[in-house]
Image (tube, rainbow, N blue to C red):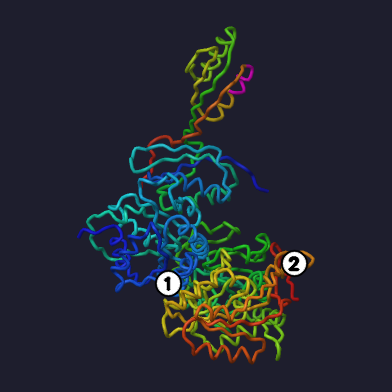
Amino acid sequence: MKIMKQRCMVVLVDNNAGVLARISSLFVQRGFNIESLTVSPTENEKLSRLTIMTSGDEKTFQQIIKQTGKLVETRLIFLVEPSFSMVRELMLAKYRVTADESAGLSELIASYGGKVADASDGCLVAQLSDTPQVLDDFLSAARGFKLIELGRTGVIAMERGNVSYEL
Amino acid sequence: MVLNGSEILVNVLLEQGVDTVFGYPGGAVLNIYDALYKYRDKITHYMTAHEQGASHAADGYARATGKTGVVIATSGPGATNLVTGIATAYMDSVPMVAITGTVPNNLIGADSFQEVYIAGITLPITKHNFVVRRVEDLADILRRAFEIAGSGRPGPVLVDIPKDVTAAKTEYEAKPAVKTVRCDGIKGDVREVAELINRSERPFIYFGGGVRISEAGEELRQLIETADIPASYTLMAAGVLGYGEKNNLGLIGMHGCYSANAAANRADVMIAIGTRFSDRVALNPDKFGHNARIVHIDIDPGEINKNIIADYSIVGDVKEVLTELLKHVKPAKHDAWQKQIARWKQDDYKPEASETELKPHYLIEKACEIAGKDAVYVTDVGQHQMWAAQFLHHTHPRNFLTSGGLGTMGYGYGAAIGAKIARGEDTTVVHFTGDGSFHMNMNEICTAVSYGVHVITVIFNNSVLGMVRQWQGAFYDRRFSSSEPERVTDYKAVAEGFGGHGFRCETPEEFETAMKQAMEMDGPVWIECIVDREEKVLPMIPGGKTVHDTIFK
């Protein structure tokens, strides 16, 4: 039986036009799942960093690493080891609140380490950055409030301590 | 020296040792064709009837020589017409550089006339592709394209060049040809695998196109002889071992020999070399080689554990790996295993001969007898392709060209023309095709006429799409949906109408006479052969099944 798991991987690629299309094309072509994907500049202007949250079984993860690793523009790909890595996601969640609810929601946001990014027109925008699990927990805890818009960045990840890649 | 982009392009081609290109002109590549005109004494351009034919010709040229094939097409439809040829090359790991023109930089993205985003279209069917936005980048990108196409597991690379880049000028400095690298070392425990082979009682080798690309036929032969290992080949490796050579069990897979498939099923160690456990060989991936410890040797790490899980894997260039392996493999004899295989061989399918009718195996064997062992044989796709793989007793790895992975009907004629141009006067090129496949690209006869290319085309005319019809007969209760077109094409007349030669044969005697005459002719020759529509490719293991489900009639 296939055991489906979620794994996070980091891909360092040449910062070329079209590289994102190339990688997402590969994922779609081979039927790999993308739960979230982020792209950003890095400390090296020639490289871009992709963080991909994917789901599958162990065999699929190995295939993703090998097939993505084969692309000419891929410099490095590695699975993020959850036990010694930080995985973070940013979320904005807009709630429509009554005057009575406002304080309660603000308190809840604060208890999850977030902040109120905006409060206007009877709406309140929560800004949180943490692990995806904590963000999910917050959304559950805030279920009593009227959520009208939600945006999440998808995760980025980094290993702890004095480890870094060499290219 | 200062040159325009088109002159730089031609100069980089010359740097790489390219003296032959295939293609078709058009608006976006007018500057490139102007440069080709200027350098026409150094580089020969062959214009085909259709860009698809040019892409297959570049492919055939590459397969017949091992060099990187080059094809040029204009923007839009010119570029999209290359797609099937590029995908064919991609699936069979053929080194190719496809050069397309596109609209000028300032018109890109505006749905301009004959604009298409070919880099996007070819993303999944190229090893890599480039859009060259600045003339200053052109030379190095082209060099890199050749490096990528020929290195590691080879494949096609596309370079898309806007028209203004082909006209813009910049400084050009000649450089030596790029070096292609097969593979950096070997990953895996060769000694452990050697010990596994040394301990085995029923070893079995199944090898594919990687052995041909790596030119490791001699090393393979040594391994087979030293350790007494029966071996069978995939479609992509036909000709690596000679027909009748000891321990050559023949073709494996869906239409492979029963004995080869039975051996794969019963082996205790299976060594897969330069191959990828495709669904046409490992028809049921859970049961293929299920009694064996599986060793997978391939240059592409992505192939390991993709289709089946290997017990042992070695990633590296096949030639290097086998050389290393041979240092540790001990001489052995497997008499009991050989006896068992000999018994299975008695059950191998044997076609019936006929004095009066043209039988598929007769056509292949007779053509081979007349054209000789050194001829290059090219096929299209379908029944005739499988018959060729089964009955053509080829002996050279670069003398059997066929579209294996993609299964491209219409591949053959372009590829045959490319192969003939590559190998020259001294090599006979025979193109086997079916009436279905041939109707796709038979127009390339005009190319063969224009350039005086002597290719003998043997058309297996059973008036139906034989392979489709065979499946409909076996699995769809003989509902022959769209497989019996009842075409009345007069091949002899068509060939002559284009300026070539044609024959029509109904008996073995007529075929022998036509084939012998064709050998002496110039330019393209078509030999239409009437074949019964009930002829089947046998044996057959249906997809998803095992050797126990082999169909013999």
Mark 2 vs mark 1, CA separation in Å:
41 Å
Chain of residue at mark 2? B
- At mark 2, the secondary structure is loop
Identify residue type, mark 1. Answer: Gly
Asked if residue A131 is positioned above or below residue B381 in the image, the reply reads above
Nearer to me, B413 or B263 = B413
Q: Locate residue A134, reporting x and y percent.
A: 55, 26
Horizontal arrangement in the rendering, residue A143 relative to residue A9 (left or right) = right
What residue is drawn where x is 33% and y is 40%?
Answer: A45
Residue B249 in sight from this viewpoint: no
Instruction: Indicate yes or no whether the magenta region holds residue A140.
Output: yes
For this orientation, the residue located farthest to the left is: B1
Task: Tell me the residue that label 2 is attached to.
Answer: B480
Discs 2, 1 touching: Cβ within 8 Å: no
- At mark 1, the secondary structure is loop
What residue is drawn where x is 76% and y is 68%?
Answer: B474
Task: Tell me the residue that label 1 is attached to.
Answer: B66
Name the quarter where the N terminus of chain B is drawn: bottom left
Q: Residues within 10 Å of mark 2 (few under 14, many from 20)?
A: some
Residue B535 in sight from this viewpoint: yes
What residue is drawn where x is 57% and y is 57%?
Answer: B305
Q: Which residues are magenta?
A: A139-144
Asked if residue A147 is positioned above or below residue B15 in the image, the reply reads above
Instruction: Indicate yes or no whether the magenta region holds residue B532.
Output: no
Asked if residue B365 is positioned above or below residue B73 in the image, the reply reads below
Horizontal arrangement in the rendering, residue B552 relative to residue B399 (left or right) = right
Identify residue type, mark 2. Answer: Phe
Q: Are marks 2 and 1 on the same chain?
A: yes
For this orientation, the residue located farthest to the front is: B497
What residue is drawn where x is 76% and y is 76%?
Answer: B553
Nearer to me, B90 or B114 = B114
Q: Locate residue B146, reporting x and y percent.
A: 37, 62
